[in-house]
Amino acid sequence: MAILSEYEEEDQKNPTSSAPPARKPFSVALDPSDPLGFLEKVFEFVAKETDLFKSDSLVKDVNAVVRMVKDKVEAEDKKREQVKIEENLAAEKKINAAVAPPPVKKEEVKKEIIKEEVKKEIIKEEEKESGSGVEEEQNGRRAPNKGNGLDMDTYSWAQSLQEVNITVPVPPGTKSRFVTCEIKKNRIKVGLKGQPPVLDGDLFESVKVDDCFWSIEDQKSISILLTKQNQMEWWKYLVKGEPEIDTQKVEPENSRLADLDPETRSTVEKMMFDQRQKQMGLPSSDEMQKQEILKKFMAEHPEMDFSKTKFN
């Protein structure tokens, strides 16, 4: 028992319980421009204070720690980037919601459509009243354009008593070798090679083929000059099948009349006078001349009774 007691006393003096190892202080400043230098100091301290560098798996263990830290840093970066993207999207939604116009109701849309239709109708009525439009007349004929011809979708034409001028727009840069233009006495065909013709039909009246020409103007349009065979008549249309113009509304230029010889000019002025008289429901120059002759005859023969006579 004594021996045991002695052992117990010894045990009490030298307790067998293991105490935690003392911590070693470590203080080194990190230079952001030299992070590897900082790690070198850390490894030197660890090698001095521990047995880590005596382990056979040192390199493997250190690589595992580095990889773990790297994965952690990358995960945190991705998380911050995702948060930033979500914040930007939320801010964008707020801006769009603030800028976007309020939704338009169906009733308001219908009202706007009705307003536009009413405006169009008013414009049409004004054009009809002013006579500036090219709407078809009651007799199915159209008012002529400024050149006494007509503007079509793919070409336009104008005329004087002697000539007809046709303009056909073509793609910019078109050369004359790409154009096909056939002018015959009573027919015309115009277009670009390899494409359907723009004009192809019988003319209103015959032309002098030898006095007809065509050319490319500024590589943008085909200009065609037709010389009329009958230079005392206005054409009602260019080719058969297109709308007719109202020749009573033709307005020849005064400068053109001045260029005519006296006989032709007199005939043209007579035609213009007869057209105006017809529009107003008044007798033509020939009818007026006949009336004057009849009045003179009646004055010279008062003995004759014309009261029951019918005159055509």
Image (cartoon, rainbow, N blue to C red):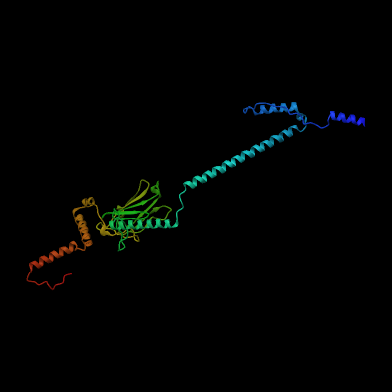
Taking the spot 64% from the left edge, 39% from the top edge, the residue there is 75
Q: Residue at x 13, y 66 (%)?
A: 294
Give the answer, above or below, for where 299 lies relative to 162: below
**Image coordinates for residue 266, horizontal then vertical, percent:** 19, 56
Residue furthest left in the image: 303
Q: Residue 83 lies in what quarter of the image? A: top right
Of 22 and 215, which appears nearest the observer? Answer: 22
Total marks in image? 0
Which residue corresponds to the image point at 64% horizontal and 38% vertical from the top-left?
Answer: 74
Residue reaching furthest to the bottom: 308
Residue 210 vs residue 300, the one in the foreground: 300
Vertical side of 50 occupied by 241: above or below: below
Q: Is residue 23 left or right of residue 246?
A: right
Res 76 → quadrant:
top right
Given residues 298 and 231, the one toward you in this image is: 298
Q: Quadrant of the N terminus?
A: top right
Taking the spot 68% from the left edge, 28% from the top edge, the residue there is 39
Q: In the image, 102: left or right of 215?
A: right
Residue 38, percent across and down?
67, 27
Q: Position of residue 79 (x, y in %)?
A: 61, 41
Residue 187 coordinates in the image, percent (x, y)? 34, 58
The quadrant of the picture occupied by the C terminus is bottom left
Reply above or below: 262 against 26: below
Residue in front for this viewpoint, 84 or 74: 84
